[in-house]
Image (cartoon, rainbow, N blue to C red):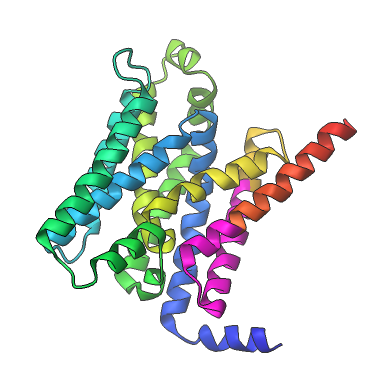
Amino acid sequence: MEIFEKLASYFEFPFVRYALIVTVAISICAAMVGVTIVLRRLSNIGDGLSHVAFGALAIGIIINITDKFYIVLPITFLAAFLLLKTKNSKKLKGDSAIAMISVSALALAYFFLNVFDTSSNLAGDVCSTLFGSTAILTLSKTDVLISVILSLVTVALYTIFYNKLFVTTFDENFARAIGTKVWLYDIFIALSIASIIVISINLVGSLLVTALLIFPALSAMRLVKSYKMTIIVSIILSIVCSVIGLLVSILASTPTGPTIVIFYLGVFLVCFAIGKIKERMA
């Protein structure tokens, strides 16, 4: 009862309600897009783009842009599109391009932040940006609005183009043969991934964003087999883990990002065990 009373008192503050709204919005669209990413074997792209987003954040800090969203989103989107374009390249394979961009972005970002000495607590700021801290509790109404709009647009487009995305996910050659413009859906996936990463940085930090995309999909795949049910279960698991992780981090004063990811990991291990039991019973 004390815990519930404490939570009720926290929800009297607008910033806690804002954090909860953004967390749910991010969880839904990340889970939907994450299923497509996992099935298309693009799991590493989220990790690579999170590093690119950190590099873009560094640029925003150095040139002193107040709202860094407007510089992080286009840079991350461009990187996502280029990485998707290289996945079938014979000269530069997708995994190689991801590794190259990922390491370069991290190195350049930290190098220039140190050179320009933009903060008196650089190590703390970098750690907070990479792993998440309490930034989710400092969201403004504008941040919440942008996050919700991006999430709603992503979910709406994913629903509208569900059948096309299904075909391109499982068989790109067949999709091209029936006249589907695969490149157009690659752009949509790139923009979706970039949007999710940008709005998730305040929640879990740039290095842990991949967990939001990958863990729910992998957990759901251990429980169900159909594509549609995988998406639905993935969304449910994503919301539950993110919300519980957020609330626990507030109550226990732990870093938000790592706390949420620990819950994702725990749920995945449970789902993995259930999947093993189902296989043996079958």
Return the residue nearer the eye: 217 or 55.
Answer: 55
Q: Could one spot residue 63 in this view of the protein? A: no
Q: Quadrant of residue 176?
A: top left
Return the residue nearer the eye: 219 or 81.
Answer: 219
Residue at image point 40% right, 36% down:
45
Image quarter where the C terminus lies is top right
Question: Residue 39's x, y, as percent?
Answer: 54, 30
Residue at the top extreme? 177
Residue at image point 48% right, 50% down:
29
- Tell me if 278 is positioned left or right of 74 in this view: right
Question: Residue 86's x, y, as percent?
Answer: 32, 23
What secondary structure is the magenta-colored segment mainly?
helix
Q: Could one spot residue 251 in this view of the protein? A: yes
Question: Residue 148's x, y, as percent?
Answer: 40, 60
Image quarter where the N terminus lies is bottom right
Residue at image point 40% right, 74% down:
137
- Magenta part of the chain: 234-262
